[in-house]
């Protein structure tokens, strides 16, 4: 069985930054990229708030840059997904990871950077039209709705960002917000309110999606009056939050009620020796590329110091 110093699970800003630091420390890291190589950032076109890119950068291009940098220092980037884990309780002991429900490898330290996944409303009609008018990624799928009216659900930064992106492509974007205010940052709120073709419907929830082969309209209800009406739209975008990708760690690592990994304050350490968590998998507060990258750096340094005790 292959034995490694450090295996990194996941390939977003946290995973790649961890790989860069671990490789430069000569730990010869192995990375498994998972289901979404590059992570959530690959669903974003313009990343404008990452330091060092004065003109902004495309999310995919940025992830490719990070990947190339990690590989330049010797990271072994592998396609595949870690499907199950058995973590050791023994300091210095090897953790066993199963790749794609088949091959097993061992690692003396593991950095978890599996990120989070978009949530959906859970409507039967939403499931019915998945891929036929329903999407959780405006940047991935917005182009298909160019020149058409769309609806987006949510009131946070993600919803606001996606609404402003869609507004560049679509004549009318209707934003459904359950409360009477947006949770988004002030800058994003200002952008929404100053975009002429975005209409915000406050105190509004989705009842069902209407259509034959795909979405043709959205039935909504005003939560204050109970009045229902129908908005004609061919695209329905969901931006209501995320679920951390931690199912394979259940029962082995401490999590909060949502599933975010619990780490020791001021570090990336989990309660298992040699197991570290970085990025959105352990961060429900900031969830930014730059903060994920920062914790990726921390995880690699934590792993390096941990491994130094046993070599």
Image: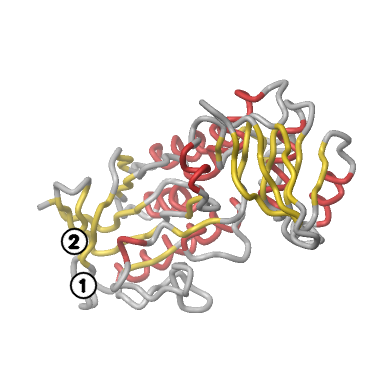
Left or right: 119, with 204 as reference point: left
In the image, which disc is placed on residue 250? none
Left or right: 198, with 301 as reference point: right
Which secondary structure lies at badge 1?
loop
Q: Residue at image x 47%, y 61%?
A: 281
**What's the CA distance linking mark 2 and mark 1?**
8 Å
Residues at circles 2 and 1 in contact by the CB criterion of under 8 Å: yes
Q: Residue at image x 90%, y 42%?
A: 194
Q: Is residue 66 above or below residue 144?
A: below
Which secondary structure lies at badge 2?
strand
**Dot 2 surroundings within 10 Å: few (below 14), some, or many (20 or more)?**
many
Residue 201 in picture, x, y percent from top left: 80, 49
Q: Which quarter of the rendered picture does the C terminus lie within?
A: bottom left
Q: Is residue 146 above or below residue 297?
A: above
**Dot 1 surroundings within 10 Å: few (below 14), some, or many (20 or more)?**
some
Front position in the image: 192 or 85? 192
Q: Residue at image x 23%, y 61%?
A: 85
Q: Is residue 225 above or below residue 274?
A: above
Q: Is residue 85 above or below residue 232?
A: below
Question: Could you tell me if residue 222 is visible in this image?
Answer: yes
Of the numbered discs 2 and 1, the one sitting upstream in the chain is 1
Picture colour scheme: secondary structure
Left or right: 1, with 92 as reference point: left
Report which residue position mark 1 lands on: 88
Residue 102 in picture, x, y percent from top left: 14, 47
Residue 99 in picture, x, y percent from top left: 21, 48
Front position in the image: 25 or 297? 297
Report which residue position mark 2 lands on: 96
């Amino acid at each position: 069985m292959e034995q490694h110093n450090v295996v990194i699970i996941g390939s977003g800003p946290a995973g790649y930054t961890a790989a860069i630091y671990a490789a430069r420390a000569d730990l010869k890291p192995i990375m498994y990229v998972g289901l979404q190589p590059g992570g959530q950032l690959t669903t974003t076109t313009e990343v404008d708030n990452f330091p060092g890119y004065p003109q902004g950068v495309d999310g995919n291009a940025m992830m490719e840059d990070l990947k190339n940098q990690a590989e330049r220092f010797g990271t072994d980037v592998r396609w595949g997904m870690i499907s199950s884990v058995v973590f050791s309780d023994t300091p210095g002991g090897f953790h066993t990871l199963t790749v794609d429900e088949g091959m097993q490898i061992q690692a003396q330290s593991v950095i978890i950077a599996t990120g989070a996944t978009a949530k959906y409303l859970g409507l039967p009609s939403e499931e019915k039209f998945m891929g036929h008018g329903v999407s959780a990624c405006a940047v991935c799928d917005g182009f298909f709705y160019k020149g058409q009216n769309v609806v987006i659900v949510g009131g946070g930064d993600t919803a606001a960002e996606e609404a402003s992106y869609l507004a560049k492509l679509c004549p009318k974007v209707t934003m459904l917000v359950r409360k009477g205010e947006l949770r988004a940052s002030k800058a994003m709120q200002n952008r929404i309110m100053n975009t002429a073709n975005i209409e915000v419907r406050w105190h509004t929830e989705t009842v069902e999606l209407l259509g034959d082969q795909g979405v043709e309209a959205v039935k909504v209800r005003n939560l204050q009056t109970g009045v229902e009406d129908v908005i004609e739209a061919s695209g329905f975008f969901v931006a209501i939050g995320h679920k951390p990708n931690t199912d394979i760690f259940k029962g082995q690592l401490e999590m909060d009620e949502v599933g975010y990994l619990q780490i020791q304050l001021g570090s990336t350490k989990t309660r298992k020796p040699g197991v570290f968590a970085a990025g959105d998998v352990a961060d429900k507060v900031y969830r930014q590329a730059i903060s994920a990258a920062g914790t990726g750096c921390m995880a690699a340094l934590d792993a390096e110091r941990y491994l130094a005790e046993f070599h």
